Image (cartoon, grey):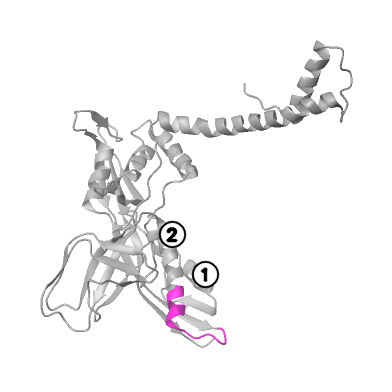
């Protein structure tokens, strides 16, 4: 068993050895020449013990992860929607090629992920974009993507919030995910199925993660389990659903190697897309003296409300009181209440999303 020896123990061991093996040196008191000669290397030996211990402590989990081929998850690209608007309807179609560059005011770059056509007779077009760099750096709030050299000066560019970029998995996050992985080793259990589905991801040709499972809902019946998933960029794509179903059922590699699935024999497991339930919210607010209901204040309240919506798990409840508490945390709000009368139940197969948001100023 590996044990750490500290400075005092190392010094005592060397002094005891000197006393036992010779009789010419007898002064081993603090400050003596003999003691000083052994204390100097004892300091270095104690440090070496500490380095061995730290290295061993870090190597054990790494060795376990490697034994199970359990690598850290890579960073994921932030993906979202940009809207380009102009005052008058277009008089001709405008092809917008894949790779069209959009910029935020601070210079972060996003590129369109597919060819889009701005149709004749319309005043706006919505374009799916992804950040040029992976990770949370690509996350941005609403209205911050405002530039593109592809469009003329008459076009107004804006965006919905983008918050699905993910940094590379940390060691602590890998340890938590590894605990779920261990629970899935038995396969056939609900925990195993959920782990398999959570592992699904869609990657680009360069191997970058562009979509992953952000939320899972479960509905069980005898002999049948419905798994509902929500993607990192919104409603799950067909590719993400297919990947998740493949991991559950098992699949075969090109060389003929069979990869077992996670469902039990005789149990049907179906992976479906979650739907979005849009909730319109109206709030009546009174303000402290010196504050006015500006667009910036409304946007700040809206951001807090959207955070509350994002925190509602499938199968749980959105309480109106939580919206009130979130809005009251905004500086300048004296009192506020929600016009919606009842709490909202979020089904196992859906995600709650904020729809039309209105704040009405009232006298206290």
Q: Quadrant of the C terminus?
A: bottom right
Q: Secondary structure at mark 1?
A: helix
> Which numbered disc covers residue 196?
none
What x and y, as percent, mark residue 359?
Answer: 42, 80
The span from disc 2 to disc 1 (Cα, nearest Å) is: 14 Å
User: Circle 1 is placed at which residue position?
Assistant: 325
Q: Which residue: 28% across, 34% down? A: 261
- Whether 106 is drawn above or below 247: the answer is below
In the rendered structure, which segment of residues is drawn in magenta? 288-301
Q: Which residue is mark 2?
A: 311
Q: Verify CB contact (< 8 Å) between mark 2 and mark 1.
A: no
192 or 110: nearer the viewer:
110
Q: Residue at x 37, y 70 (%)?
A: 142
Q: Quadrant of residue 259?
A: top left
Seen at 36% across and 41% down, the residue is 195
Which image quarter: residue 177?
top left
Neighbor class of circle 2 (other Cα within 10 Å; few <14, some 14-19, many 20+) is few
Position of the N terminus by quadrant? top right
């Amino acid at each position: 068993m590996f044990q750490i020896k500290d400075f005092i123990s190392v010094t005592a061991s060397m002094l005891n050895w000197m006393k036992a093996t010779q009789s010419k040196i007898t002064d081993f008191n603090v400050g003596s020449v003999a003691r000083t000669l052994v204390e100097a290397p004892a300091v270095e030996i104690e440090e070496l013990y500490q380095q061995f211990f730290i290295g061993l402590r870090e190597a054990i989990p790494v060795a376990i992860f490697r034994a199970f081929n359990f690598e850290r998850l890579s960073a994921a690209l932030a993906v979202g929607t940009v809207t380009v608007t102009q005052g008058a309807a277009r008089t001709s179609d405008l092809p917008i090629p894949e790779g069209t560059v959009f910029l935020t005011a601070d210079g972060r770059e996003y590129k369109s992920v597919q060819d889009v056509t701005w149709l004749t007779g319309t005043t706006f077009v919505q374009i799916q974009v992804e950040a040029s760099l992976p990770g949370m750096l690509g996350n941005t709030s609403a209205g911050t993507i405002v530039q593109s050299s592809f469009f003329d000066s008459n076009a107004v560019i804006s965006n919905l919030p983008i918050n699905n970029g993910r940094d590379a998995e940390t060691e602590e996050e890998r340890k938590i995910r590894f605990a779920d992985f261990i629970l899935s080793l038995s396969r056939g259990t609900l925990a195993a199925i959920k782990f398999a589905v959570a592992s699904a991801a869609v990657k680009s040709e360069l191997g970058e993660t562009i979509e992953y499972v952000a939320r899972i809902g479960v509905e069980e019946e005898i002999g049948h389990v419905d798994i509902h998933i929500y993607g990192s960029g919104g409603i799950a794509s067909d590719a993400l659903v297919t990947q998740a179903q493949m991991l559950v059922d098992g699949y075969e590699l090109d060389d003929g190697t069979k990869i077992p699935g996670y469902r039990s024999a005789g149990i049907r497991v179906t992976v479906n897309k979650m739907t979005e339930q849009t909730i319109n919210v109206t709030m009546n607010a009174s303000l402290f003296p010196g504050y006015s209901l500006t667009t910036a204040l409304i946007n700040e309240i809206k951001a807090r409300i959207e955070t509350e919506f994002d925190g509602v798990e499938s199968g749980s409840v959105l309480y109106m009181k939580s919206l009130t508490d979130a809005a009251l945390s905004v500086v300048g709000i004296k009192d506020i209440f929600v016009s919606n009368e009842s709490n909202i139940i979020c089904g196992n197969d859906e995600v709650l999303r904020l729809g039309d948001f209105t704040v009405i100023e009232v006298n206290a």
